[in-house]
Every structure is written in C-alpha cells, then in structure tokens.
Amino acid sequence: MRRVPPWLLLVAMLPAIAILLGACSALPSPATPPAPSATPQARGPAIMRSPDYSVQVFLWGSPHVERDLRLAKEAGFTWIKQMFQWNYIEGRGKGKFEWNEPDRLVKAARQEGLKILARVDIAPEWARDKSTDLKVSGPPKNNEDFGEFIHALVERYKPGSPFGEISAFQIWNEPNLAFEWGGQQPDPVAYTRLLKVAYEAAKRANPDALIISAGLSPTTARGRIALPDSEFLKAMYDAGAKSYFDILGAHGAGYKAPPELSPDEIGRDPRYNHNEPGAGRIYGFRHVEDVRKIMVDNGDGAKRVSVLEFGWTSDPRPDSPKRIGLLGSA
C-alpha cells in the first residue's frame, strides 16, 4: 500500500466488527428523560488526525451498547460512526423531539472516551413531499425544517453539554443515487442548497462542529437512477458548495481491485472492471484520488477528505446481489 497522504481521513467499516458491535434494527425512542444534574467542563473543538480511524456501529435500540463500545475501543478505534436519523428523532411532528435514545448512545460513547461522527439523513414523513417515494430515503420539501433539526441536534450535543458531545456531522448519504434522494433524479444543486442550510444552522449552534459533506456513491451510472460521483461533485462546486463543509466526504469502494491499483490500471484490466446494465464502470479504492483532484481544481486543496465508507465484498458467490457491495456499509 502507498503511504496515507495527509489530506486523507479514513473511516473503517469492517463487517466482522460491525456485526460484533451489535448491529440491530433501529427502534424509535421513548419519552425524553430528565437532564443530568452534573455539567462537564467544556472542551475545545474535536480534531481529526490523518489518518484517524473510526468504525461504523449500529447501536440504535441495542441492549449491548456499553459492551459494543468497549470492544470498539479495545480494537483501537477513537471514533465511532452512528446514524442519527431525522425520522427517528423528530418523526412524530415538527418540534416533537425524542431524545431518549440519542442521549443514551452519546452518554455511553462519552464514558468510553469515543468521539462520534453522526450521519444525519432520512427526512420524516411529515417533512417529505408526498410526490417522492416514501419507501426510500428522501430529502425534505422545506430545507429550513432540516436546518432547524440540525440546529437542535448540534445545540444539544455541543461541547460542555450535560448530554454528551457529537463532534462531527455527515450531512446526508449518497445523494447522487435516486435511492437516497426520494426516488427522484439526483440533483447536485438541490443537495448543495440542503448542505448550505445545514452548515449554517450547525455553525450557529456550535461554530466548532465539524461538518462533512455526504459521501457519494462511486459510480459512472447516470439517468434517473444515479449521477456519476465526479460529475455530481463538480456540479456541487459550481453551485457554491465549497463554503459549506469543513471536510469532504467520500466513499472508497474496493470492489474487485486490490487497493494499490489506480483507476487507470483498473480501467485497462478486464479482471477488475465491473460492468452491469445501468451500473456503469465502478472504480477501485484509489478513485478517492480523482475526488481529491476535483477539490484541488476548485481551489479547495487546503481541506481534507474523510473516507466515510470503504471495503471489499465478503461474498464470493458470483450470483450474489451483494457481490459489488461494501463491507459493513450503511
């Protein structure tokens, strides 16, 4: 493997660990508990080093949170990545927050000394445009509703909070796929507007909160089902996204290729190409370097890249629908 460059932050998502850390079905939370009486001392802004490793956990509703976080810490991780779904926290209606479950998870992470990267997406039904597919993740009809939710989330878990701290926030996930965009054709300009509202709301609540843009699905597919990640990111920059994130999110799928191969080498070798109808050619892990070049070309080279998902398929069956999946992706 090549040396990890200083702009690259890695979020490890490995299946054995993800399963070990108690993956379970997400459950809505019950009533809000009373606030703790003791208030910890405020700390400075969270720091992500390069490389800094995290593991994806699926702890919402799990009865084994303390055990699983202890295992993550013993494995050497300093961060965890956990979904904080909008539809679970404010699902009953605007302003009707259910903080019991997020409070429980954040407090447990604090006790283990683990920092949290929160993936925030999936609008509740009340906030969705009914013309979108409600069976898949979709954006809100009013971005300000999302902004107000982000403000409440960041405010509750900022440094010094009695409820614990969330250090970084990933704004949405793979919006270049229709599946993550309400079944609609992906729209980088619309996502950039959503990112802007979320960024500004988060910074009003805590100027030190780290805001990470959505990791994009590494694909060259286009049309109603997807937009190539490179094209999507270029359009985000054209729409002014540069001012509205602290770290760029990226997904580094390995697929069939060894991690050291460049996209050009993969493209020339039929053993590592992946071609399915409508899927487009899929790159390898070092496609992240292509994403980095787009940042540099847009004068954004001072920022770093966080690889929010990466890995290789663990299913060897050629007929498996998971054969192009990521290890432990969420």
Image: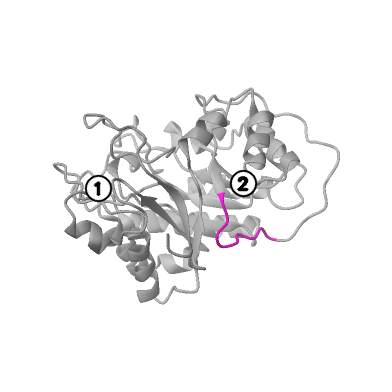
Q: Residue at horizontal 44%, vertical 37%?
A: 328
Q: Which mark is residue 226?
A: 1
Q: Position of residue 11 (x, y in %)?
A: 51, 50
Residue 71 covered by magenta stretch:
no
Pick whichever, 13 or 272, lies toward us. 272
Q: Position of residue 310 (x, y in %)?
A: 42, 48
The colour scheme used to paint the residues is: one colour
Residue 43 falls left or right of residue 301: right
**Callout 2: 10 Å neighbours few (<14), some, many (20+)?**
some
Residue lying at the far left in this picture: please name it.
Answer: 277
- Helix, strand or loop for disc 1: loop
Name the amino acid, label 2: Phe
Whether residue 49 appears in this view of the structure is yes
Q: Residue at horizontal 66%, vertical 49%?
A: 155
If you read the primary sequence from the N terminus, does the residue marked by circle 2 or circle 1 appear first? 2
Please name the residue that numbered disc 2 is placed on: 77
Name the amino acid, label 1: Ala
Q: Position of residue 300 (x, y in %)?
A: 44, 73
Residue 182 falls left or right of residue 24: left
Tell me if residue 61 comes above or below residue 16 in the rendering. above
- Helix, strand or loop for disc 2: loop
Which residues make up the magenta segment? 45-53
Q: Position of residue 235 (x, y in %)?
A: 30, 64
Examine the residues drawn in magenta and state their main secondary structure.
loop
Tell me if residue 224 comes above or below residue 305 in the rendering. above
Q: Residue at horizontal 36%, vertical 67%?
A: 237
**Callout 1: 10 Å neighbours few (<14), some, many (20+)?**
many
Q: Which mark is residue 148?
A: none
